[in-house]
Amino acid sequence: MQLSRRHFFKFMGAAGVSAAVLPSSVSAWESKAPPDPYGCLVDLTRCVGCRKCEEACAEVNGLLTPERLNCQCTIYDKKRRPDHKAFTVVNRYFTGKLDGFDKPLPTYAKVQCMHCQDPACVSACIVGALTKDETGTVRYDVDKCIGCRYCMVACPFEIPAYEYDNPITPRVMKCTFCYDRISKDGGIPGCATICPTEALTFGKRASLLTVAKKRLKENPGVYIDHVYGEREVGGTSWLYISSVPFERVNLPVLSDIPSPKLSETIQHSLFSYLWSPLALFGVLGAFMYKSNKVVEPKNKGGA
């Protein structure tokens, strides 16, 4: 009997169905989000693209000075992403809006780690190098990291970056939410301290949602009636309000379901009982034995 791809996937499909109907004693998935985390509200209608947030971020985290800091004329010609040298970047988008002189009106959008309420990167990390802190920060422990980069694959916002140019001690790099400032000094993230137009507002996430919804209600002709990050992937610590559709400024359309909910539910269902992995390997072993068994040729003619 050959273990064909079709037979294998039939077997795995049956295993998946069995996992889905396991007894109710399998514990249901529960959110691990902190009850009252900090957050940051980004008002895209107020951002003028000065990139002061990039400068402050680099200074606080000991990173290189942002490229072409004093020349905004060409830096926006290319779309940038956060990487191991820049934890936050601002991009410019033309979404079809016109000013009073019928000239294209740009929208600027800052991007960084969203510090999700139930982070996919934390769930994917097999050694606990990434954790969700009570402040709302997704923290990284370089001493635990083994460089598997599962976090980079899992992140729905494609944020974690790897130090590929560091062959000896490479790290996974991303926005730290200025954790030391928040937790030890009672301060606020560097980017939020310097914004000249108050496009960035730092505070408790619940309070920021109240502020955001008040602005939407009082200015229905200015804002889209949606707070990005309130529910996306279960909620994020960074929240956005905007006058243009969020997908037009490269904020992805995502489900409200936390990314770890499905993966962790399947894992817990399959391995909640000792016999589950034993049965799985036993059946696979039987398939392999039958597929590799040598059949003795029939004896033709008498001896």
Image (cartoon, rainbow, N blue to C red):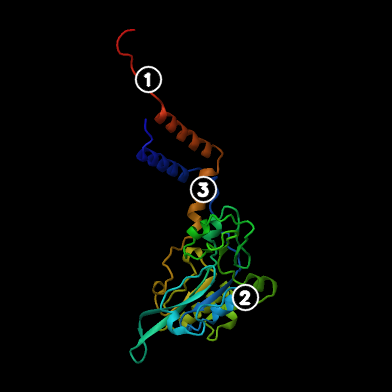
For label 2, the residue is: 60
Point out the image quarter for the N terminus: top left
- Kindly report the distance in space between the C-alpha atoms of the residues bearing marks 3 and 2: 39 Å
- Amino acid type indicated by mark 2: Val
Please state the horizontal and vertical placement of residue 203, each as a whole percent of the image.
Answer: 60, 76
Please state if 142 lies on the left or on the right of 17 as rendered.
right
- Amino acid type indicated by mark 1: Glu
Q: Nearer the N terminus, badge 2 or badge 1?
A: 2
- Kindly report the distance in space between the C-alpha atoms of the residues bearing marks 1 and 3: 42 Å
Please state the horizontal and vertical placement of residue 7, each as a whole percent of the image.
Answer: 37, 38
Q: Residue furthest right?
A: 184
Instruction: Confirm whether residue 19 shows in the render.
Output: yes
Report the residue at 63% width, 70% height from top.
179
210 or 151: nearer the viewer: 151
For label 3, the residue is: 267
Please state the horizontal and vertical placement of residue 191, each as a whole percent of the image.
Answer: 57, 78
Q: Secondary structure at mark 3?
A: helix
Local crowd size for mark 2, using a 10 Å CA cut-off: few (<14), some (14–19), many (≥20):
few
179 or 272: nearer the viewer: 179
Q: Nearer the N terminus, badge 3 or badge 2?
A: 2
Instruction: Confirm whether residue 30 shows in the render.
Output: no
Please state if 77 lies on the left or on the right of 197 as rendered.
left
